């Protein structure tokens, strides 16, 4: 399966590259004439095809992932998606995790960096790269990355999770007051959820426990758990 997958990746990338090279040979300043689409129009059209293929392969890989779990064979599919559509943030995020779990830390880190280069506003990729920095004990860089993720607003990770990760990083760096303020912000975030969202009783119980735990860290008397 792995050989077939890699062959497919190579074939599709070759086709996409061939189209792009052919279009790039159009003389500078040339405009489309005689009803034939210009190089720019064709590029846009092919870009749409590549985005569609990226979507199809991501959905296929995602279904296989949820069916069979963490299978290294799926990495090639996600990598293919990032080449077909460099702005498919979810593919970078999942692929980095799979590659890292496969024991290829450096490759995962490099892919994460490539993802950020193509998507400088992707909060989830900053959160992901922060985890790599924490492993390397590059806490200042981890803090900067988590701050960027909080600022941009992640789609795959909750704000609460980011606030707790950033608070932990502040704690390691000795910035205890900043860490305390973030725990309070996390408390407020969850209290707002309790007040504004229609939640199942089990979800309410989980949120109250999270609020209690965070308040125990920053308040002398903790939090009684009232809504």
Image (cartoon, rainbow, N blue to C red):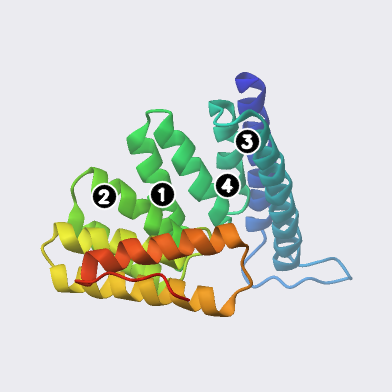
What label sits on residue 133 in the rendered view?
Answer: 2
Query: Residue at 43% of width from left, 57% of height from top?
Result: 125
Q: CA distance from mark 3 to mark 4?
A: 20 Å
* Label 4 environment density (alpha carbons within 10 Å; few <14, some 14–19, many ≥20): some
Q: Are marks 2 and 1 in contact (CB under 8 Å)?
A: no
SS for callout 3: helix
SS for callout 4: helix
- Observer able to see residue 210: yes
Numbered disc in front, either 3 or 4:
3
Numbered disc in front, either 1 or 4:
1
Measured from the top left, where is residue 161 in percent x and y? 40, 60
What label sits on residue 112 in the rendered view?
Answer: 1
Front in this rendered view, residue 19 or 1: 1
Relative to 39, residue 72 above or below:
above
* Label 2 environment density (alpha carbons within 10 Å; few <14, some 14–19, many ≥20): some
Relative to 90, residue 147 above or below:
below
Query: Residue at 26% of width from left, 65% of height from top?
Result: 216
Q: CA distance from mark 1 to mark 3?
A: 20 Å
SS for callout 2: helix
Q: Specify which label sits upstream in the sequence, 1 or 4.
A: 4
Would you name the residue on which mark 4 appears? 83
Q: Are marks 3 and 2 in contact (CB under 8 Å)?
A: no
* Label 1 environment density (alpha carbons within 10 Å; few <14, some 14–19, many ≥20): many
Would you name the residue on which mark 3 appears? 65
Q: CA distance from mark 2 to mark 1?
A: 12 Å
- Observer able to see residue 117: no
* Label 3 environment density (alpha carbons within 10 Å; few <14, some 14–19, many ≥20): some
């Amino acid at each position: 399966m792995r050989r077939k997958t890699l062959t497919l990746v190579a074939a599709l990338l070759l086709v996409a590259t061939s189209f792009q090279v052919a279009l790039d040979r159009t003389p500078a300043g040339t405009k489309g004439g005689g009803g034939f689409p210009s190089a720019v129009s064709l590029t846009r059209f092919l870009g749409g095809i590549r985005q569609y293929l990226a979507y199809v392969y991501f959905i296929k890989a995602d279904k296989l992932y949820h069916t069979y779990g963490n299978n290294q064979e799926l990495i090639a599919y996600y990598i293919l998606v990032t080449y077909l559509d460099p702005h498919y943030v979810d593919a970078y995020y999942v692929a980095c995790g799979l590659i890292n779990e496969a024991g290829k830390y450096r490759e995962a880190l490099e892919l994460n960096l490539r993802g950020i280069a193509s998507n400088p506003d992707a909060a989830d990729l900053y959160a992901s790269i922060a985890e790599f920095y924490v492993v390397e004990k590059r806490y200042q860089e981890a803090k900067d990355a988590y701050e960027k993720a909080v600022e941009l607003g992640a789609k795959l990770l909750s704000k609460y999770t980011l606030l707790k990760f950033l608070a932990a990083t502040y704690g390691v760096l000795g910035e205890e007051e900043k860490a305390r303020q973030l725990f309070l912000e996390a408390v407020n975030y969850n209290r707002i959820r309790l007040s504004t969202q229609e939640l199942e009783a089990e979800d309410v119980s989980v949120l109250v426990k999270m609020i209690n735990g965070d308040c125990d860290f920053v308040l002398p008397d903790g939090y009684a758990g009232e809504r």
